[in-house]
Amino acid sequence: MALDQSFVGRTYPPTEPYEVGREKIREFAEAVGDTSPVYTDPEAAKALGHPDVVAPPTFVFSITFKAAGQVIADPQLGLDYSRVVHGDQKFAYARPVRAGDRLTVTSTIEAIKSLAGNDILDIRGEVHDETGERVVTAWTKLVARAAEGA
């Protein structure tokens, strides 16, 4: 069943603030195999002009994907999550994510398309710090595969 096109442009409420911690940044950098000291050493980060360690560019995915859960869980949209695969991800940064940031995410459905029986859902996540400054915009593409025999 095709997703409801009237949901294009729908914006969901901002998430509760997520506080970015040094340890979370270190763990993420380690998990993705990035050994840059700017992710683990406050002095190295300060030498590059940052107030504290910064997060690897894809760190914010864990925050924005969780926020996209509001879209995914919306029963009126009609998305069958058991059929969903991750199609694409991209980011546009205003500044790096830093330890100590308190970030909120506001998710908006940008597009819904049907292609060969598959539903393609584009979600934009606007990430702001506690002052309201935009930190990054993330776009997530989800593909809901067509049901067997459809």
Image (tube, rainbow, N blue to C red):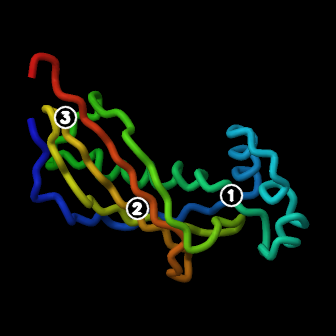
> Which picture quadrant has residue 106?
bottom left
Do the residues under discs 3 and 1 have CB atoms within 8 angstroms?
A: no
Q: Earlier in the sequence, mark 2 or mark 3?
A: 3
| Residue with the mark numbered 2 | 125
Tag in front: 3 or 1: 3
The amino acid beneath tag 2 is Gly
Give how far apart the Cα atoms at labels 2 and 3 are.
22 Å
> Which picture quadrant has residue 12?
bottom left
Which residue is pictured at 40% across the width and 56% down the height? 139
| Residue with the mark numbered 1 | 55
The amino acid beneath tag 1 is Ala
Return the x and y of residue 17 as percentages of the image width and height. Answer: 52, 65
**Label 1 crowd (10 A; few <14 / some 14-19 / many >=20):** many
Give how far apart the Cα atoms at labels 3 and 1 are.
34 Å
Q: Which mark is residue 4?
A: none
Q: Earlier in the sequence, mark 3 or mark 1?
A: 1
Tag in front: 2 or 3: 3
| Residue with the mark numbered 3 | 118
